[in-house]
Image (cartoon, rainbow, N blue to C red):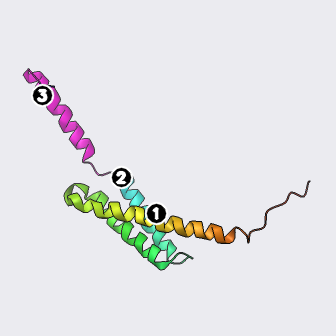
Amino acid sequence: MAATSAAQRTALATAAETLMALSNTVNAAGILTALGILLIALAMRKGSFAKGAAYLGIATGAIGIVSEALRDVIGPGYYVYGLLLPAWFVAVGWKLYRLVSLSAGKIPLRRDSAA
């Protein structure tokens, strides 16, 4: 699409600048997600989770906060967070799966006394 007049060029330039401004802003939800991961990982250190998963979460949360806040500055460095995030989710998911599998036979089913 070619702009033929000055008004069209101005409109297209304004639209492009708006799009760039929207995509380059710091996403508060991303920072809050990374903060949540950090807090969960800190709590995991005291529980039945493996220490490695907890420390992976601490690293993921801390790097995530920095990565989300400085996304425009660090450029490809953001990929480090992008790789740590699914690794932490897999580690936590695997541990939760194992906990449920181990406890499935130990938890008695509740029976209704009305029957």
Which label sits on residue 89? 1
Q: Position of residue 109 (x, y in %)?
A: 79, 63
Position of residue 36 relative to residue 54, above or below, is above
Side of 11 where 81 appears, left or right: right
For this rendering, which residue is in front, 20 or 104?
104
Label 2's element?
helix
Is 66 included in the stretch rendered in magenta?
A: no
Q: Amino acid at mark 2?
A: Ala
**If you read the primary sequence from the N terminus, does the residue marked by circle 1 or circle 3 appear first?**
3
**If you read the primary sequence from the N terminus, does the residue marked by circle 1 or circle 2 appear first?**
2
How many labels sit on residues? 3
> What residue is drawn where x is 22% and y is 59%?
76
Label 1's element?
helix
Which label sits on residue 28? 2
**If you read the primary sequence from the N terminus, does the residue marked by circle 2 or circle 3 appear first?**
3
Q: What's the CA distance linking mark 2 and mark 3? A: 31 Å
Side of 16 where 43 appears, left or right: right
Discs 1, 3 touching: Cβ within 8 Å: no
Q: Main secondary structure of the magenta part?
A: helix
Residue under numbered circle 3: 10
Discs 2, 3 touching: Cβ within 8 Å: no
- Residue interval drawn in magenta: 3-28
